[in-house]
Image (cartoon, helix red, strand yellow):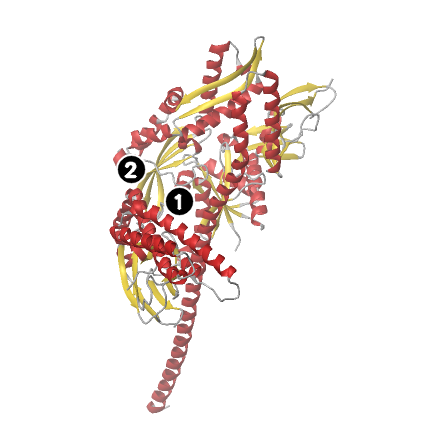
Amino acid sequence: MAKVIGIDLGTTFSAVAFMEGGKPVIIPNAEGERTTPSVVFIKGDERVVGRLARNQAIVYPENTVRSIKRHMGEDFKVSLDSNDYTPQEISAMILQKLKTDAEAFLNEKVTEAVVTVPAYFTDAQRQATKDAGKIAGLNVLRIINEPTAAALAYGLDKGKDHTILVFDFGGGTFDVSVLELGDGVFEVKATAGNNHLGGDDIDDRLIDWMTNEFKKQYRIDLREDKVALQRLKEAAEKAKIELSSKTSTSINLPYITADKTGPKHLTAELTRAAFESIVADILEKLKDPTLQSLKDAGLSSNQIDKVIFVGGSTRIPAVQRIVKDVVGKEGEKSVNPDEAVALGAAIQGGILKGDVKDLLLLDVTPLSLGIETLGGVFTRIIERNTTIPTKKTQVFSTAADNQTAVTIHVLQGERPMAGDNKTMGRFDLLGIPPAPRGIPQIEVMFDIDANGIVHVSAKDLGTSKQQKITITSSTNLTEQEIEAMRKEASANEQEDKKRKEDADLLNHADTIVYSLDKALADFEGKVDKQKLETLRQKGDDLRKMIAAKDYGAIKTKTDELQKLLSEAGTELYQQANKTEGQQDQTKGSDTMDAKYKMDGA
Amino acid sequence: MTKETLDEGRTDTLLEMEKIVAEKDAALADIQKQFDALKDAAKQIAADFDNFRKRTEAERTKEGERAAKNLLLRLLPLCDHFSLCLEHTAHHDEFVKAVSLLYSQLVTIMEDAGVRQISALRQSFDPRLHEALMYVPSEKEDNIVVEELQKGYLLNDIVLRASKVKVTRKVEG
């Protein structure tokens, strides 16, 4: 089936995506970037779109056009290289570039697309966009609103009816939309915004600040120096990005300029608070349109169920805070804000093409599944968020010599210790032939079918004896219960980690004591008596510590004992070498390496 | 036609129809069975693909970290040398020598990682590699880079950063 692409035809940048296995994926352009500047260069027969057009814009301003989207649907012509072009024709060149790059990436012809437009676009503007698609050789299956696309990217078309505020603050434009979802269809209740406000204004403000500070200090105006200005531009963008995750940043531009007294460096510390005060008036301008959109929708802020962020500038914490102040809700930001619109357009394309997704509704396991192993440890077999149906096997062994039965205790949850998770079921596998611990191989298989029913089986690979259990209650947990379990896991993370480490330590010490007992028999008569006595003594000490769960002491003692054991082992082999010819094999190291995790029955 | 033959005829048709319905039912059940099997298989493949994608993403993140680690390990000595450099600033000539050594050390690390400088000066302006920040009118030549304002770099074949340049633009004399 031919692929439909989803296109975000933006004012400053455009992006394209497609559906792969039920998920939208961004298609990188020929330059390897995930977004393409909406800039077109025309000279003679030469037509260049994107970064290459931007790179020569300064030299040929009369051949370059930017932000054509602002003129869509207008009776407007742009004159390039003595030819006149309509906004549709220019937009078509951008769409053509996206189409060609998508074809190269997908290795097949693309003829159908879903294209997004701002929610406030009139019919004429929408028609112009559709025409642009036609000129580019694309059958535009549908024109959809940018906020609707963003909501689709967040998967908000599923579930119960609700009201969404889409806050889109990009490089050059700012749009707020209020959407209402009813019967799986989005309706735009209100839109507001500012066509000339964006991240670029923030960069400019930072450049102003840097040049002013520099001028105050050295009386040199860096704005007159193109090279310096370019470096400032880069530094401004870097500072802005850094301040989204850090509370302060250093701006260092050595040798930014020079005068009679010598070279000058620009060095400045910018805190997030200072940055926010520099751009305060820009941030202030975000408030009114947001309030206006609520007013026009006839809603109060508490009637908004969800807020989603679109556009790179929404990464700025102060922007997010303003939204929270005005709407009273944290915005969602799990989807890349630069890509959300294109991703949503691709999803719409999938829906229009009758994607088989509904037929194959895939579910995920909300919590990890696993079994209890030695020391009460929870060993995960299927990680949470795994798509079902799925199947996984893992081989375990016994924890004690001559253990003839094991209990398979099936649990779900995110805590590392079994006791903190929820029991789903339990069964015994009996009749394991007596063998040293770690020798029997017991294969445990988890199989979750498409209905979420969990089948767990345990098979002794030696005898092929098998036992199984079917658990149908795994989906009985409500969403709240699942969420509560996840929260509990993250709240107890530190403490749980310590407990898990203690349990591992105990298991390790137990292994050492076990191998010591085996080794002592082998060492008898071959290793110095006194050494053997020390080993025996230390082993007894460690056993006592294990019983008392004296974790601090266990660690030191285990390490010490391990070292002594290995020394004794070395001595044994040296002895063996001396008395060559005598058969003198030891199984010591084999037992040391054996992994036994299974809890004894 | 008598009543009997008529009834007989009807019964025959009825029997015939029942037979056809039974056959269709059996065929439908067969198709349903095949459909269910295919649906199960499709679900299995879709889930496998989804899990494959999740695993690939996780692996890619790890791979990225490993790559960054390898590069950072090579940068650490440079960091050490810089701090040594700053401890010995008193001897100007030696300091300059050290800084130039460090620069060539850094260039080597970058070259080993696949980074190459873009040549720009006196070349024809190429928007794939160069970004024009300004131009000078010229009567003689068109589209030639006459000044490199900031060096550009390639990572293998990808433009890491375009050279920032000044180019000529021919004006009719």
Judge whether residue A479 can be spotted in this image: yes
Point 52% across, 17% down: residue: A265
Q: Report which quarter residue A47 is drawn in.
A: top right
Residue type (three-letter) at the residue carrying disc 1: Leu
Q: Disc 2: which chain?
A: A
Number of other residues with Cα within 10 Å of mark 2, as a class: few under 14, some 14 to 19, many 20 or more: some
Mark 2 sits on what residue?
Answer: A304
Compared to residue A32, the image places residue B59 above or below, namely: below
Q: Quadrant of the C terminus of chain A?
A: bottom left
Q: Secondary structure at mark 2?
A: loop
Q: Are marks 2 and 1 on the same chain?
A: yes
The disc label shown at residue A152, or none? 1
**CA separation, marks 2 and 1?**
17 Å
Identity of the residue drawn at 44% across and 56% down: A569
| A287 sits to left or right of A576 | left
A134 relative to B91, above or below: below
Rate crowding at label 1 as few (under 14), some (14 to 19) or many (20 or more) other CA atoms within 10 Å: many
Residue closest to the eye, A494 or A143: A494
Disc 1 is attached to a residue of which chain?
A
Q: Name above or below for residue B69 compared with residue B164.
A: below
- Of A448 and B138, which appears nearest the observer? A448
**Mark 2 residue type:** Ile
Viewer-side residue, A521 vs A213: A521
Q: Earlier in the sequence, mark 2 or mark 1?
A: 1
Give the SS element for disc 1: helix
Which residue is at the front of the view, A421 or B92?
B92
Residue A524 location (% of width, % of height) = 39, 61
In percent of width and height, residue B61 lies at: 47, 44
Q: Is residue A427 above or below residue B115?
A: below
Q: Quadrant of residue A80?
A: top right
